[in-house]
Image: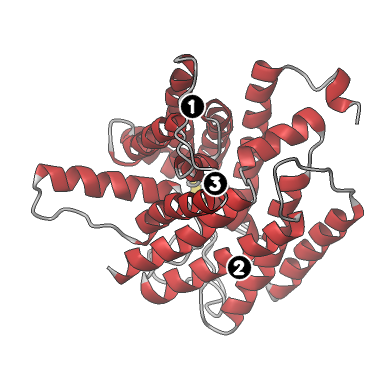
Amino acid sequence: MIGALLGILCGALFGFVLQRGRVCFSSAFSDLYLSKDNYIIKAGLLAIALTAIGFMLLAQFGLIKLAPSALNWGGVSVGGYLFGVGMVLAGGCAGGMTSRIGEGSTTHIVAGLVYGLSAWSASSGVLKPLKSWANGMKVIVRNVDPKYFVSDEGTAIGPSLSNMFNINPWIPTLVFAIIILVCLFAVKTTKRDGVNLKWWVIGVALTAVNMLTYFLSAQFAQRQYGLGITAGWINILKTWTSADSGAEAAPTLNFAGGIVIGVISGAFISAMIRKEFKWRVPKSGKDYAYAVIGGMLAGFGANFAGGCSIGHFLTGSSLLSLSSFIASLFFLLGNWTMTRIIYGSPVGDHWSN
């Protein structure tokens, strides 16, 4: 129970930041493609750079163990691309669609539920054989430094820039972070309407929440990972449906499920404070159709890839995970493909500024 409560706490903080900063990596990718709007993507990259250092500090003092995801070439490429396509249709990445539920968006309620069901089916439903087949292609790393990395028997640790070379993991981490920081502050930041927080404030806030989440999950929930959304949706649906069925050994809400509940709650609190909560019903029913299709593609893609834009792009990249780097690339490619189909090419006024 303590794990679920701590997950709700971390999720609430995360949801508050997402709503307050209007953070959604689906729109961040799309806006970068359509209009060179780099405001949110800069906040995300800053969070990745700072969190990479933060995770190393926590590991240095023995507070966490680093656990980069196992590399599944087929999963992260195919799943990542499908997730990228799906999040555009669903109207948000996993974190974005979940936080928008807290603002009263009915289309995102539909997208979120379908997302969770689709991800669940890929892990334990009719699509499980496909996931099991893909898992056979996993690449893992053995004989990692137990001071920094999880080394428990049976734990599949994937390759990262920090464990592939026989050097102190601080070296690639600092090089990685410094390169990102130099690029961020060398590039002019575009303006972002509707966002009252500075991009660097958003980045620092995301870093703080991610570090806190990793620390609390490691200390109290036997879970060596930071922020993520997909596993939480699966846990909530499993808990909900098993309770209704009267199963004796019904699963209970865990840390990951608590994060999702917390994100919705935190976004709701932020929206109420800012007087932005409103039940939103689209004028056209096709928006619900897009939500269903997008939720299905994104949910399956996230599970097949082993994570979503939060689990891979925001958290996994901070672990310097090769799996997360590749997944993030395919998130971007899938997002830009569907963005081009729906909104057209970035020509004319899109690129005039």
Q: Which residue is mark 1?
A: 294
Q: Which residue is mark 3?
A: 275
Q: Name which residue lies at 36% across and 40% down.
A: 132
Residue 333 percent coordinates (x, y): 67, 31
Residue 40 percent coordinates (x, y): 71, 46
Which color scheme does this rendered protein use?
A: secondary structure
Q: Nearer the viewer, mark 3 or mark 2?
A: 3
Whole-number angstrom distance, CA of label 3 to CA of label 2: 26 Å
Question: Does the rendering let one see residue 61?
Answer: yes
Q: Name which residue lies at 82% across and 61% down.
A: 181
Q: Nearer the viewer, mark 2 or mark 1?
A: 2
Q: Which residue is mark 2?
A: 208
Task: Looking at the image, tell me whether mark 1 or mark 3 is earlier in sequence order.
Answer: 3
Question: Does the rendering let one see residue 320?
Answer: no
Which three-letter amino acid code belongs to the residue tagged 3? Lys
Which three-letter amino acid code belongs to the residue tagged 1? Gly
Using residue 184 as the reference point, say whether residue 295 is left or right of it.
Answer: left
Using residue 245 as the reference point, say whether residue 239 is left or right of it.
Answer: right
Quarter placement of the N terminus: bottom left
Pointer 1 local density, CA inside 10 Å: few below 14, some 14–19, many at least 20: many
Could you say which quadrant of the image residue 344 lies in?
top right
Residue 261 percent coordinates (x, y): 38, 53
Pointer 2 local density, CA inside 10 Å: few below 14, some 14–19, many at least 20: some
